[in-house]
Image: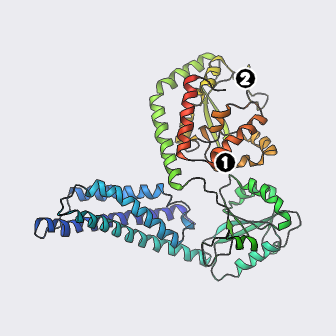
Amino acid sequence: MNKGLQVIKYLLADWLSASAAWTVLYIFRKKVIESNKFGFDVPITFDEKYYYGLLLIPVFWVTLYTMMGHYRQIYRRHRLKELSQTLWTSAFGVIPLFFVLLLNDEITSYRDYYQSLLVLFGAHFLLTVTFRLILTTRTVKRIHRGDIGFNTLVVGGNERALGLYDEISSMRKSPGFKFLGFVRVNGKDDMLSEHMPCLGQYQRLPEIIRYKQIQEVILAVESSDYREIGSILNLLEGENVKVKIIPDIHDILRGSVKMTSIFGTPLIEVNQEIMPAWQFSLKRVMDILLSLVAIVVLSPVYLTLGILVKLSSPGAVFFVQERIGHHGKPFNIIKFRTMVKDAEKNGPQLSSTNDQRITRIGRFLRKTRLDELPQFFNVLRGEMALVGPRPERQYYIDRIVEKAPHYRHLHKVRPGITSWGQVKYGYAENVDQMIARLKYDLLYIENMSLAVDIKILFYTVLIVLKGSGK
């Protein structure tokens, strides 16, 4: 699979559709609207306004589709979803175009406005959905032929897992699962071993997922092992995989099983969506714009603090340390140095209120959170967000997970410069305090929205201004 090439195909198709729809509207306005207005057949001449539209309108549509998440999971699209998404996005997108492009037209009556709007919507929707359905149909056929498959891991090697494998293998049209192996749940479930390799116990799920580049995980757990499901789901949290569960007859009778494909086997998909795609896109745009503004506006503050840190004690101005981010990927976080040089020469240590390693300027930076300012560069690099759970080192994550396995939920989103836990709790001095702060970050993820982000940013600014950080 070449995901990048597939995205480019959709981008080009959408660009051409938007350009063609604009051309149809332009010709319609010349031949119908303006001809009726002036009482003679107006010749079609492509003026400057047409070429500006030809350049800018496709950019508008591609940007809108990107924000609405149309280019995510490009190989997992199906035709009904393509039809509905394109319909609603087209209906939403033509409204601003109408006010920008058509509202100042020369018209005979308001009926001309409605006709123009209908032509723009109809042309754009029909052209876009036609191109997309062609691309999506080709992809679906390649999946059904087995040319495209998603690396799949089965959790459990019991009778249910074997039945699922036999059912999928006997299908005339492949649903897209490419089985790379299975993991045991109770140490005895080996019924799948004749069909695929056993990759170990379920406790190694994160390691196996990354090593094998797993994209789908199917839970085939016996009722006697249901107590393990919580542990399994905790291990899968923060991993960039789709999780599906084999339902029993009670799930089907309750209506929990929703089919997305006539040819697919019945599975319950664990919904891992936190916010709608358009809100995630808007959040990222807001992160980039506010970070750029902050870096420019606060550049004198950066310079001043850099000089103060350098003069306060020997050592570098910036402190760089590896942290664990989105989907468990490591990155280097950047902060103004607040401790003496070689503060952790004896191993990882959390700071405390009266920590002698903290410099005089460092204590001020911590109380005002100004030591976090360089992380705006982490935001621009896509490693962090303005708001999100604070990232930790792997050393402490391993210790937190021993007591609170649900910590992995935090890896579902980008870590942030500030967080609900940081605002409500402040810096943690030990693992127990990290776990106590964890509940606020979990609440943030479960209630994640742009409105909550703005509220947390507001309180963070108050903490900076008051110097009341703990």
Q: Position of residue 381 (x, y in %)?
A: 54, 42
Query: Is 163 displayed left or right of 291 in the figure?
Result: right
- Quarter of the figure that contains the C terminus: top right
Q: Residue at x 28, y 68 (%)?
A: 24
Q: Residue at x 70, y 82 (%)?
A: 170
* Quadrant assignment, res 367: top right
Q: Is residue 367 above or below residue 279?
A: above
- Label 2 CA crowd tier, 10 Å (few <14, some 14–19, many 20+): few
Q: Position of residue 351 (x, y in %)?
A: 73, 27
Query: Is 124 displayed left or right of 204 in the figure?
Result: left
The secondary structure type at the circle numbered 2 is loop
Q: Residue at x 38, y 62 (%)?
A: 15
Query: Is 263 displayed left or right of 438 in the figure?
Result: left
Q: Residue furthest right?
A: 188
297 or 38, which is in the foreground?
Answer: 38
Amino acid type at image mark 2: Thr
Q: State yes or no: discs 1 and 2 in contact (Cβ < 8 Å).
A: no
Q: Position of residue 333 (x, y in %)?
A: 62, 36
- Quarter of the figure that contains the N terminus: bottom right
